Structures are given as C-alpha cells and as structure tokens.
Image: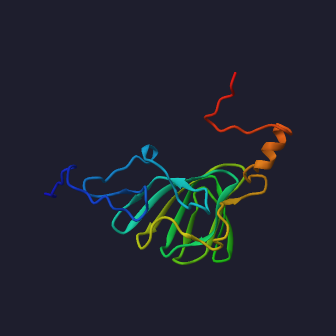
Amino acid sequence: MAEQRSASTPQQSKTKTEGAIKAGGGRYTFDLAKLSTIDAGPGYSTAHGPVIEGERIQIGLMRVPRGTGGRPHSHPNEQWVYVVQGTLESEVDGVKSRVPAGSLIYIPANVVHSALATPDADVIFLTAKDMSHGIVGTPVDTSISAPLYAPGFEPKKQAAVSARRGPGSRERGAGSRRAR
C-alpha cells in the first residue's frame, strides 16, 4: 500500500521565480485558471501567466497578446514551448519558424531566441523549463526596456495623447478632481 501524505505536510515555499507557486509538500494538482499570474519576461516580453515550480521542472501557462512578444533573450535552462492557441513567429538560434497551435518549440540552454504572437490572435502556450534557473531570461540588448511589438501594435506615445487633447490642455492624475 502506498504511503499517503497529509495535505498539511509542511511545504518548502522558496521558489526561484518571484510569484511562482512551489509544488509538492501536499500540493500536487493546480487549477491554472485560478492562480495568480506573473510577468515571464519583465522589460523584454509581454508573456504572463501562472508558474508552478517542482524540484527539477517548472511549468507556466503563458498568454501573449496579439502583435506582441519577447525580444531576443537567453537563459541557462533549456525550454519547451507548446502552443495551445494562436500562432507564434519564433526564432531560435537564427532559425525562423511560424508555429501554429498544436506545435512544439525546443530551445536549448543559453541559446538566443524570440517569439511574437501574430497580429490576428492572442497566443496561449504551455512552457516547461528545467530548474537550473528561474522563468525569466536575460535580453540580448539590455539598453532597451520594452517587449517586442509587431508594426501597429506599439504602445501609444504620450505626445499622441497630448495632441488629441489639443493645445493648452492639462493632464490630471487618475485621482485628481476638477474644482467646481
């Protein structure tokens, strides 16, 4: 008969990725739709979703808004990406691919790669990485602190907002009120 462990068994809560959930110690199943999301590539990617870390493997269910993605980056852990919904335009070690739902991408450790959700739909992908490093990588060009955008999907510039308001208009903070 298999030994049963109580759900109250103490679990180690230390994770390599801030905001990730640690598996084990009584936690063996996870409803990914109900877990908090984290940014998977702050400063270089729009991918976000819940991340679960085990002893040797971490899993993330990531969402990438259409027309956005991750600039070239690398990390010391190898990675698998299974596209659940949408299509990614990816580049791994200089090899470009169009990756539709149902396809799998392999990314060796320390290899530069990038991905962009096509403009027609958001992308959802399941990713698995070994635990030699957290979920976040290092961008190739650290002088840029922005994700990858397809043409027409760049964030609106402040100048464009001011131009729409007209000359002489003032911007007020979110909590400010105009005196009456």
Residue 31 on image: x %, y %: 40, 46
Question: Relative to 146, is 86 above or below?
Answer: above
> Residue at 48% of width from left, 64% of height from top?
135
Q: Nearer the viewer, residue 51 or 143?
A: 143
Task: Decide if residue 119 is on the left or right side of residue 135.
Answer: right
Residue 88 on image: x %, y %: 65, 59
Evaluate whether residue 153 shows in this view.
Answer: yes
Residue 71 image-quadrant placement: bottom right
Question: Relative to 124, is 113 above or below?
Answer: below
Residue 46 on image: x %, y %: 61, 56
For the C terminus, the image quarter is top right
Q: Residue furthest right?
A: 167
Task: Decide if residue 27 is on the left or right side of residue 67.
Answer: left
Residue 12 image-quadrant placement: bottom left
> Residue at 18% of width from left, 51% of height from top?
6
Q: Nearer the viewer, residue 135 or 97?
A: 135
Residue 133 image-quadrant placement: bottom left
Evaluate whether residue 88 shows in this view.
Answer: no
Q: Residue furthest top?
A: 180
Q: How is the image coloured?
A: rainbow
Q: Residue furthest left?
A: 1
Residue 40 on image: x %, y %: 53, 59
Q: Number of labelled discs?
A: 0
Task: Decide if residue 69 is on the left or right side of residue 168.
Answer: left
For the N terminus, the image quarter is bottom left
Question: Relative to 37, is 116 above or below?
Answer: below
Q: Nearer the viewer, residue 118 or 131?
A: 131
